[in-house]
């Protein structure tokens, strides 16, 4: 696509409201100023009306029961000022550093040097209420054995300062989008009313004088989050434990903003148009032979230390996990990222989404009304939410970031493909300070982790974020809003099952909606074939763009 005859000129990125995604989802009622003579729409300073939080509070003033999201990811910062009061540290657990779980507490005053204490975390683990999991005899035996082992186990309570958050930048960003709230000055100080802070134009309502914090809000800043830390190892037991732990703890929403490393189900099939190329590779059989010989050698564990085992037990465990996710989703909505490969198929387990389960596969869209350049799509996609964008250079489309200063150095030509506008909008969310954060810090001081009493020094409390991970986090926040509205109306113990929650969210979607502050309705784009838009909007956007206000209104009016 380079060296063609169409040149794209550099355009400076236009400022935009840092919580634009809440307006796009209908969480806040934001009116963006219309363009004046010879000017563009002002996307940076909308007039804020009401919020969905206000709607729930006005309908049921005495109701204050939060919903709970279980985040299965890589950990969450428990010291971030916009998250620490929303994170349920008592029930959060780390399944990476110890097979039977690890939790983190401040060092005991009596013995600050004692590194760890044993404690049971899975005594109440159960599949009760899930109904039939459709397991085979060997699968039933394996699962019962695993649960018995976990129930009798003891994990570790660490007194480490850093806890599980050192490498938790992704989980921290996801958590902020779902449940972040304004930072408060001192422990015990009440947070200001969210709508008041959002409406403040002069900064007088800032909740914290610390110059490193902003009045940041997730989709539902009144709900809470349990962090279930998992890794990327191909260990199905870890993920079985994570889902059972979330279910046993009675959470209202399960958020999985990543794929799972199932050696079979996680494989993305080649695009149909490339299958012939694969078949014509003359060394295909030779490469396959070498791979099989490598696995057969006695030194295979040294040559391929991360090779996937092929024992019957591993296959049984992965089968159990797939069936367990589906069963749990019928009781608790399981919200999954669709994947960031630009494929017309979803990653696992988003690709398990079906009409008879509560798995919600989430794709990403931009304010231009198009699918985000990286967002996976296809027949199993449930719905979409706002996120950032990605450049695309294929024979089917050309999507160029014209805010890149280097764009003038190249020539681009769409060929027979379609020119799709690129969006420079991204999702602002919470971040780890310093080099472990998504942003990596914003000045030289950020290369050193700041002191514990003020980790915001050096910047790094916030980051630009996106992906279908970010979109899924926003949908999880809306699911929490729906669950909290249901508790407000029917009592603190009321719960929506996964099928009911999914039904409400899907009904609140619109395939013809515009993604605020944009004004263009959702529009299919040719990503992997020229004729793909003919497959319809459902193929690209599922039920469409989610409207939080409509979803909550459905619950409150029921």
Image: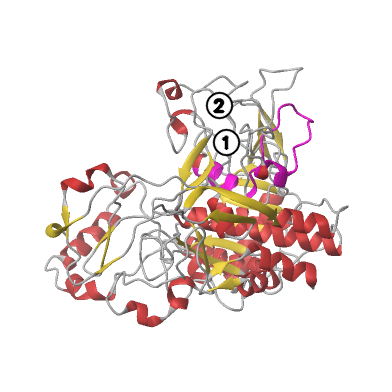
Callout 2 environment at 10 Å: few (<14), some (14 to 19), or many (20+)?
many
Q: Quadrant of the C terminus?
A: bottom right
Q: What segment carries the magenta color?
A: 170-198
Q: Work out whether residue 120 or residue 536 is closer to the camera in this orientation and state it.
A: 536
* Nearer the observer, 377 or 308: 377
x, y (%) of residue 552?
71, 64
Residue 340: x and y, percent? 40, 58
Report the quarter where the N terminus lies. bottom left
In what element is the residue under mark 2?
loop
Up-down relation of residue 512 to residue 91 (above or below): below
Label disc, if present, on residue 164 of the rendered structure: 1
Q: How far apart are the two marked residues, 2 and 1, measured between alpha carbons?
A: 19 Å
The residue pinned by badge 2 equals: 456
**Label 1 secondary element:** loop
The quadrant where residue 143 appears: bottom right
Q: Is residue 165 magenta?
A: no
């Amino acid at each position: 696509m380079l060296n063609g005859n169409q040149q794209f000129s550099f355009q400076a990125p236009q400022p935009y409201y840092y919580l634009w995604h809440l307006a796009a989802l209908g969480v806040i009622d934001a009116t963006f100023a219309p363009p004046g003579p010879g000017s563009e729409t002002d996307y940076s300073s909308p007039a804020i009306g009401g919020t969905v939080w206000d709607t729930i509070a006005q309908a049921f003033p005495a109701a204050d029961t939060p919903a709970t999201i279980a985040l299965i990811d890589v950990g969450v910062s428990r010291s971030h000022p916009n998250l620490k009061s929303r994170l349920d540290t008592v029930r959060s657990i780390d399944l990476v550093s110890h097979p039977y779980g690890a939790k983190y507490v401040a060092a005991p005053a009596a013995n600050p040097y004692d590194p760890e204490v044993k404690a049971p975390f899975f005594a109440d683990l159960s599949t009760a209420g899930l109904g039939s999991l459709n397991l085979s005899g060997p699968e039933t035996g394996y699962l019962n054995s695993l649960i018995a082992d976990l129930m009798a186990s003891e994990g570790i309570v660490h007194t480490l300062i850093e806890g599980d958050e050192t490498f938790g930048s992704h989980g921290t960003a996801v958590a902020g989008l779902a449940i972040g709230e304004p930072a408060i000055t001192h422990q015990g100080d009440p947070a200001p009313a969210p709508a008041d802070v959002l409406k403040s134009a002069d900064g007088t309502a800032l909740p914290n004088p610390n110059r490193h914090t902003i009045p940041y809000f997730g989709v539902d800043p009144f709900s809470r989050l349990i962090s279930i830390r998992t890794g990327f190892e191909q260990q199905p037991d870890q993920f079985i434990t994570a889902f059972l732990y979330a279910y046993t703890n009675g959470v209202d929403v399960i958020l999985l903003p990543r794929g799972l490393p199932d050696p079979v189900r996680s494989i993305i099939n080649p695009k149909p148009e490339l299958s012939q190329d694969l078949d014509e590779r003359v060394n295909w059989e030779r490469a396959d032979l070498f791979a099989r010989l490598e696995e057969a050698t006695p030194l295979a564990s040294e040559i391929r230390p991360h090779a996937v085992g092929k024992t019957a037990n591993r296959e049984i465990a992965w089968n159990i996990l797939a069936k367990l996710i589906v069963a749990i989703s019928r009781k608790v909505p399981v919200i999954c990222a669709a994947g960031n490969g630009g494929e017309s198929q979803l990653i696992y387990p988003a690709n398990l989404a079906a009409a008879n389960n509560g798995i919600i596969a989430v794709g990403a869209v931009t304010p231009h009304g198009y699918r985000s350049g990286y967002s996976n799509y296809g027949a199993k996609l449930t719905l979409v939410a706002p996120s950032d964008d990605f450049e695309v250079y294929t024979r089917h489309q050309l999507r160029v970031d014209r805010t890149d200063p280097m764009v003038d150095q190249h020539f681009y030509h769409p060929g027979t493909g379609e020119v799709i506008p690129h969006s420079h909008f991204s999702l602002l969310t919470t971040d780890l300070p310093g080099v472990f954060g998504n942003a990596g810090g914003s000045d030289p001081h950020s290369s050193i982790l700041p002191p514990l009493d003020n980790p915001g020094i050096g910047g790094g409390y916030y980051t630009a974020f996106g992906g279908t991970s970010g979109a899924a986090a926003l949908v999880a926040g809306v699911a929490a809003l729906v669950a909290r509205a249901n508790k407000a109306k029917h009592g603190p113990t009321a719960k929506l099952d996964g099928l009911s929650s999914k039904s409400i969210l899907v009904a609140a979607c619109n395939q013809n909606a515009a993604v605020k502050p944009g004004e263009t309705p959702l529009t299919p784009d040719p990503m992997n074939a020229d004729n793909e838009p003919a497959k319809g909007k459902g193929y690209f956007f599922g039920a469409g763009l989610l409207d939080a206000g409509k979803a909550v209104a459905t619950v409150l009016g029921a």
